[in-house]
Each structure stands twice: as C-alpha cells, then as structure tokens.
Image: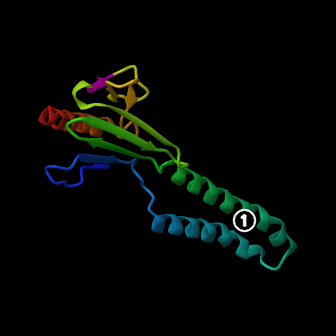
Amino acid sequence: MPYHWPSTTPDSPATLRLWPHRSLAPRGFVWFIGGTAALIALPLMAVLATPIFWGLLPFLAAAVGAVWWALRRSWQDREIVEELTLDPEHLVLVRTGPRGQRREWQAKTHWVRINRHETGGPVPQYLTLSGGPREVELGAFLTPQERLALEWDLRQRLRALR
C-alpha cells in the first residue's frame, strides 16, 4: 500500500503519509536508458565509419535524449506526498505537489466527514474530506481498492478520537 501510519506514542498525533506508485526505480531508470541506447546503437555498427553514420547519429542521440527527458518528467510529476495529521482537536492535510507546491487544509476533528463518491468523481471511489472551509480530495492517485481500504482505516481512527 502506498500509504503508511508511522507508529506514534499515545499522546502524539497520528500521521498518515500517502504517495503514488512508482513503478520505475532509479536503478531501473538507468538500466532502461542504457538498454535503449545500446539497442539504438546496434544498427549504427553496420554504418560505422561512413557518412551515413554521422547523418544518423544526431537523430538517434535525440531519440535517446527525448526518452530520458520524458521519463524524468514523468518521474518528477509523481513526486506527490499527502500528509494527514490527526489529533483529538484538529485534522490537518498538507499536500506537496510535484514542483514543491504546498497546499494545506485543516478542520476540527469533530466536524470532519469522509465522503466517498462511487461515481461522478475524477476517479472511481473518489475520497474527499469535508468539515472545514472547503472539501478536499484524499489519495486520488491510489487505486480504487486502496482508497476503500484507506476510507475504512481513516473512519476507524476518527471514531477512536471522538
């Protein structure tokens, strides 16, 4: 599950950290770029030391560079972290976006409601929190099953605090 409740002491607030799946680890990124470069370089061996080699080389290097750029951009866009701090008085949700954008939402724990929109949201089983000045989404990057598990877990923790 891409969320985690770090163990806390009874008198400290509970903190939930959520993050999106990252299917390509840094080591896999290196292997993929290296493999792509090697596979593109293979046909170049047939035209090595000819004028055709120098004509093809910039285009093939640009192709490897474009793949590298696209994967890095996709990787950076997945650097989202949502942190939910839950104590008997307040609930605070801080979302840090891909380029360091930070948004914060807070409400009194007693008034917080968890809403699940089975359809009609941007994703199936869309979770939102309400009770403050606006309604905010929670874990939109999770799978529908993970959002259901998160909803159940969060409801249990809210009940225990009230």
Q: Position of residue 151 (x, y in %)?
A: 24, 34
Residue at 77 percent of width and 77 percent of height: 48
Image quadrant in which the C terminus is located? top left
Q: Is residue 56 shown in magenta?
A: no
Picture residue at 42% right of the left edge, 55% below the top: 23
Quadrant in the rendering for residue 140: top left
In the displayed structure, does residue 99 sit left or right of residue 54? left
Q: Is residue 12 left or right of residue 55?
A: left
149 in relation to 122, above or below? below
Identify which residue, 125 or 46, lies in the foreground: 125
Residue at which label 1 appears: 61
Q: Quadrant of residue 86?
A: top left
Q: Residue at x 72, y 65 (%)?
A: 61
Q: Amino acid at mark 1?
A: Ala
Q: Percent position (x, y) of residue 113? A: 26, 25
Q: Is residue 112 above or below residue 27?
A: above
Q: Of helix, strand and loop, which mostly describes the magenta segment? A: strand
Q: In front here: 61 or 120?
A: 120
Q: Is residue 6 above or below residue 138?
A: below
Residues drawn in magenta: 112-118
Question: Is residue 132 placed above or below 13 in the rendered structure?
Answer: above
